Image: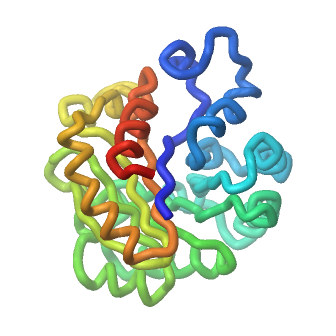
Amino acid sequence: MIYIGTSGYSYKDWIGPFYPEGIKDSYMLEYYSQHFNFTEVNSTYYHMPRLQLFESLNKKTPDGFKFAVKLFGGFTHERSAGALEAQQFNYALLPLIESGKLTCLLAQFPYSFHYNEKNMEHLKRLKEWFENIEVVIEFRNREWIRSETMQFLKKEGLGYVCVDEPDIKGLIKNVTAVTSRISYLRMHGRNAQKWYGSEGSDRYNYLYSKDELMEWVPRIKEMEKMSSITLVAFNNHPIGKAIINARELTDMLLI
């Protein structure tokens, strides 16, 4: 089955383009879940989550709703988090695990995460620490795009995250691969001019054309055939552009 949604849902600049005027932050997820059946939780990248967070998310969403949860940056960027923090993270996730709403943990690594044996060992540790949860890996450095990586991910039971992003030297670009039971696509936009050196979310300020979305339709259908569940997350969130494109792609796939 294919689930299409956005990377996060709590954005002030979505009030008007998507959310009604006067909506409270605490009601945004409930409203969002009336229109979409999947979202990414990105706040967990910035700080370790507590059980209460996922209890709240679980209560605010209907049965059948799905979440992908981004791993804390201490696991992917600073690498300061270890087995103890993983145990805490696992505990916090229990409400979503028990309700069946958790699809996977999203481990997004920076461009500085290079293809080498040391970093492959780190990926193995992540799988060990979160052994009962699907873990998917998003690389930013093109060094990882090789057959050895895909074989490694399949062997370790780790998912590969496909990305759509600007055609800039060194970035992954539009590579399609499925290495686990979950196929995953993140749409970051193609704002090449503002990808580097811009402030905040400017790099994601991009509206896909229908032709650009159509490029992915046959590829998503192939991904679906190769996996148990397919997730598509739009990260071009400024001013609700992700909402527009998520709806358009949903219509194209006739979900």
* Nearer the observer, 213 or 85: 213
Q: Is residue 223 left or right of residue 51?
A: left
- Count numbered badges in the picture: 0
In the rendered image, the vertical position of residue 179 relative to residue 56, given as above or below: below
Kindly identify the residue that appears in the image at 71 percent across and 23 percent down.
25
* Nearer the observer, 248 or 191: 248
In the rendered image, the vertical position of residue 217 relative to residue 183, given as above or below: above
* Nearer the observer, 12 or 91: 12
In the rendered image, the vertical position of residue 105 relative to residue 36, given as above or below: below
**Residue closest to the far bottom:** 155
Kindly identify the residue that appears in the image at 24 percent across and 71 percent down.
145
Q: How is the image coloured?
A: rainbow
Kindly identify the residue that appears in the image at 50 percent across and 74 percent down.
228
Q: Position of residue 158 (x, y in %)?
A: 48, 77
Q: Is residue 65 left or right of residue 59?
A: left
Q: Position of residue 94 (x, y in %)?
A: 81, 63
* Nearer the observer, 192 or 86: 192
Kindly identify the residue that appears in the image at 29 percent across and 30 percent down.
207
Q: Position of residue 78 (x, y in %)?
A: 53, 55
**Residue closest to the far front:** 254
Q: Position of residue 150 (x, y in %)?
A: 33, 80
